[in-house]
Image (tube, rainbow, N blue to C red):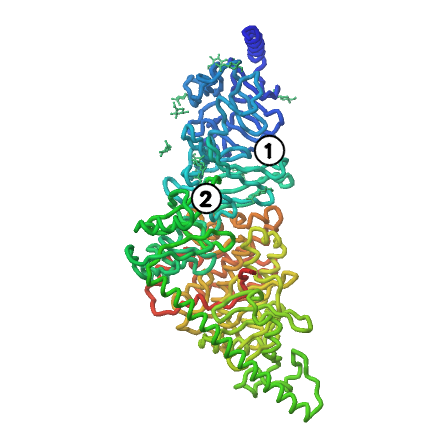
Amino acid sequence: MDFHHLLFSVSAFSMFTFLISYPSLANTTTDTLTPNQNLTDGQILVSSNQIFALGFFTPGNNTTNSGQRYLAIWYYNLPQTIVWVANNNNPINDLSGHLTISPDGVLLLYNSSLARVWYTNETIAGKNQSGPLVLQLLGTGNLVVRKQDEIDVNEDYVWQSFDHMRDTMLPGMKLGWKLKTNTSNFLRSWSSSDDPSDGEFTFSLEPPETPQLILRRGPNKEYRWGPFDGDRFSGGNRLRNNTVFKPMFVSTADEIYYTFEALDSSTLVQFIVTPLGAIQYLTWRNGNRDWSTTMEVNRLYCDKYGMCHGNGNCYADDPPCKCLQGFVPHSPQDWRLYDYSEGCKRRYDLNCNDGDGFVKYNPLKLPDNVVVWANYSSEECRAECLKKCDCMAFTRINPLGNGSQCVVWFGDLIDLRDFPDGGEELYIRMARAEIDSIAKNKWRKHIKVVVSVTILSAFVLILAILGWYILRQKRRREEDTISMPIAHDRNSFPHCLEESQEEDFELPMFDLATIFASTDQFALGNKIGQGGFGPVYKGELPNGLQIAVKRLSQNSGQGLVEFKNEVILIAKLQHRNLVRLLGCCIQREEKMLVYEYLPNKSLDNFIFDGMKRKLLPWSIRFNIVLGIARGLLYLHQDSRLRIIHRDLKTSNILLDSEMNPKISDFGTARIFGGEQTEEKTRRIIGTYGYMSPEYAMSGHFSVKSDVFSFGVIVFEIISGRKNWGFYDPDHDYNLIGHTWKLWNGERSIELVDEILHGSFSENEVIRCIQVALLCVQHRPEERPTMSAVVFMLSNENVELPQPKEPGFASERSAIKMDSSTSGQDFNTGNDITFTTVEGR
Ligand SMILES: *[C@@H]1O[C@H](CO)[C@@H](O)[C@H](O)[C@H]1NC(C)=O
Ligand SMILES: *[C@@H]1O[C@H](CO)[C@@H](O)[C@H](O)[C@H]1NC(C)=O
Ligand SMILES: *[C@@H]1O[C@H](CO)[C@@H](O)[C@H](O)[C@H]1NC(C)=O
Ligand SMILES: *[C@@H]1O[C@H](CO)[C@@H](O)[C@H](O)[C@H]1NC(C)=O
Ligand SMILES: *[C@@H]1O[C@H](CO)[C@@H](O)[C@H](O)[C@H]1NC(C)=O
Ligand SMILES: *[C@@H]1O[C@H](CO)[C@@H](O)[C@H](O)[C@H]1NC(C)=O
Ligand SMILES: *[C@@H]1O[C@H](CO)[C@@H](O)[C@H](O)[C@H]1NC(C)=O
Ligand SMILES: *[C@@H]1O[C@H](CO)[C@@H](O)[C@H](O)[C@H]1NC(C)=O
Ligand SMILES: *[C@@H]1O[C@H](CO)[C@@H](O)[C@H](O)[C@H]1NC(C)=O
Ligand SMILES: *[C@@H]1O[C@H](CO)[C@@H](O)[C@H](O)[C@H]1NC(C)=O
Ligand SMILES: *[C@@H]1O[C@H](CO)[C@@H](O)[C@H](O)[C@H]1NC(C)=O
């Protein structure tokens, strides 16, 4: 052994002299540094697979910090991509930095005055030293101190950079806890893209007993997924398997961690926390010579920590917050104005000693601050929770993957989220009165269903008999052959709208039986959407034609006016960018509209969906923008009437099989006669996020209100992000304000959905953004008409006016202003759309 050691020292010494005369370690492309060698600025270590390099670098291209040198690991063959920095908080101000490894395994980074700029303090002491130590850069990007003459099968390194994460997690790194030493390894963002010092954001796994993944800004939680339930982090679908990454959660007696692998090990991937707090999976695209964001984990509104505060439940919907069943807003007034900061309180107070019980909720993202109790069964868990008066909720999960546990929550439930797609069930404590009222409601509903089914069947029977009788009478009078579902001869059928018989309608009338049969008796599985006036069902006529049937709610008396309005309007409108009304059905209590069925559903299903958004390349998105503009122009100007839509939004834009946009839902439109261009309404119909300032605040609407909504839609199409619920860690603006900010910084291109990167026309995008900014100007007079919009969009060489600061750039301030004009009826729920519901 000793002899061997001596031999090594001699060879190391000769290498050392070699270095003195030829200080170009770089060209030797070695991956190891031995004691007595120095790695100086300009030299690098390269991993044996030629993927990673260790050396000195200066981040960014900011000339003011050009003197700042950091020891770092980067991808050897890619343009500067740093994955790890040693002295991130203590740069060296000149080129004098050099790294050495001491014989006992301590790494030391010196500057010219020989101060230790950075060092490690794990030493070989205590470990079994059987050979000299070396520093080696492995092919995984891990920089390790290990015994030179041993192959480390069990990765028992003296020190490794993988245990000291910075902002980047590479495959194989472990985000979590070493239980023996009680140490945590977590990600921390850089301060800015050219400053690697400790930034504000950390992403960690905590606490070890009930692992949750938490992004913090300073000490505050910003996002949270968990607890781990044996299969996944509650609410963290984006932290699960996908086509590129295989995330894993591992729990053993020694360690607990989150890690990931690339499914195809030849692709370069990383998981990073950006200086702005975005958590992203990145993939290297050789074609683009750049990193692309395969997935951003924290981009949903409801992902943000505690959006709906105590006992509020967050929905991917508008409005986003609702109280849990059995709870009501602390301040209904604030709640109505989208201010959720006070959360929800119980409708009935608990009475611990008498009659409290539990109501089962599912599926949810579980709330924060879970406490593990014991290995109880569900019944024991319930009984124990009931005994403790402050125990608010319980469920059973498998937090460490080695057995189910009874877990409970105390106090208000924070950071809940509706999670139909694989949430967990949760049992929440309720007062007896609440439980009774729920039971009563259920019973009432049953009765209602029974009664209405009975009435309906009687009604259908009478109808059938009547129909049969009329038919027989008719047949006797004239030999006729009516059996087609769609009447093409309007004289042979009763009229669609009974009161307006004399008006000239060319609208086919469908009979109730046909509709019933085509939609399978309005089977739940055929329901494709739900609006304020009633549900929408998919149907198929006997001749194979697919239809969408909007069924007006029987109990929504106020919907009748809108229904008639819509029938009259749509019947007269024909344009390739408007949804076509095929007919209607009005028999006694039933009022229905029959539309063409568009299999691709609505635009929001595509642009806000992680996978489906890929189906909309820029050319198609541009075409959709133009199509919507043309449809709207037709409504405003080219049709016989002047029609204002008043509830234009992405879920009201349907797509046909060739992705042509078709505007739907004219239920809220108004006809304008002649010169009348503006009207004031008391009843505001529309959707927050798309409403123009003058409409939302004082009920004034005009064609320019639609122009405003159109501008918002264009931003959403370009960015793939929603205006309402837009979140940027950097500022308080909504999507409009964000766009305006980028526009002012001449960075508009950054708005573009990253999925489009490298495949769009910059000119077209800039043109669209500029036009859309003009559309969302604060004052209606400053917005262009739709004809100007269509002209500006379709003529490349037209000089466009410069936009000024848009209206509603910050949604919060808009809401504050709004509270001064009370007495308005925000009817945000009254939107009849084809938004998808659970397909069963
Ligand atoms: C490394 O070698 C290449 C040619 O093999 C040469 O062009 C380059 O200048 C060398 N670099 C250094 C730092 O000596
Ligand atoms: C390496 O650095 C140490 C400390 O600065 C210095 O004493 C030593 O001479 C250097 N060795 C070489 C080979 O440059
Ligand atoms: C910094 O580099 C980026 C590209 O990496 C470039 O777009 C930018 O103009 C550079 N800035 C300066 C001040 O050189
Ligand atoms: C360059 O860095 C300095 C300090 O690090 C900063 O004040 C300055 O704004 C930066 N300049 C640019 C163009 O980023
Ligand atoms: C070397 O680093 C020490 C500690 O960080 C610092 O005080 C000293 O000024 C540095 N020397 C030079 C020449 O930069
Ligand atoms: C280990 O070194 C770091 C600096 O690199 C220092 O912050 C830490 O306190 C040291 N730990 C011990 C136990 O000496
Ligand atoms: C050290 O390791 C060697 C072999 O690797 C073994 O033979 C020896 O017993 C170990 N010594 C101690 C004290 O563990
Ligand atoms: C582990 O360390 C954390 C702080 O980092 C501390 O709160 C906790 O009590 C420690 N756990 C044990 C078992 O020492
Ligand atoms: C992820 O995929 C792997 C194989 O592709 C499978 O073994 C594993 O069970 C999956 N994990 C989850 C949570 O679906
Ligand atoms: C699960 O693992 C943890 C940590 O390893 C341990 O403390 C606990 O007792 C285990 N539980 C069961 C049911 O095995
Ligand atoms: C947990 O409880 C189940 C059933 O009561 C029992 O079979 C199991 O052994 C228990 N596990 C532990 C670690 O106590």
Determine whether 357 is above or below 291 in the image.
below
| Disc 1: CA contacts within 10 A as few (<14), some (14-19) or many (>=20) | some
Where residue 559 appears, x then y in whole percent? Answer: 47, 75
Where residue 224 appears, x then y in whole percent? Answer: 43, 45
Q: Earlier in the sequence, mark 1 or mark 2?
A: 1
Question: Mark 2 sits on what residue?
Answer: 404
Quadrant containing ligand 6 reads: top left
For the residue marked with disc 2, what is the amino acid? Ser
For the residue marked with disc 1, what is the amino acid? Leu
At horizontal 68% and vertical 93% (from top left) the residue drawn is 477
Determine whether 155 is above or below 695 in the image.
above
> Could you tell me which secondary element the residue under label 1 belongs to?
loop
Q: Is mark 2 within 8 Å of ligand 11?
A: yes
Cβ atoms at labels 1 and 2 below 8 Å apart:
no
Q: Could you tell me which quadrant the C terminus lies in?
A: bottom right
Question: Mark 1 sits on what residue?
Answer: 78
Where residue 58 appears, x then y in whole percent? Answer: 50, 29
> Could you tell me which secondary element the residue under label 2 belongs to?
loop
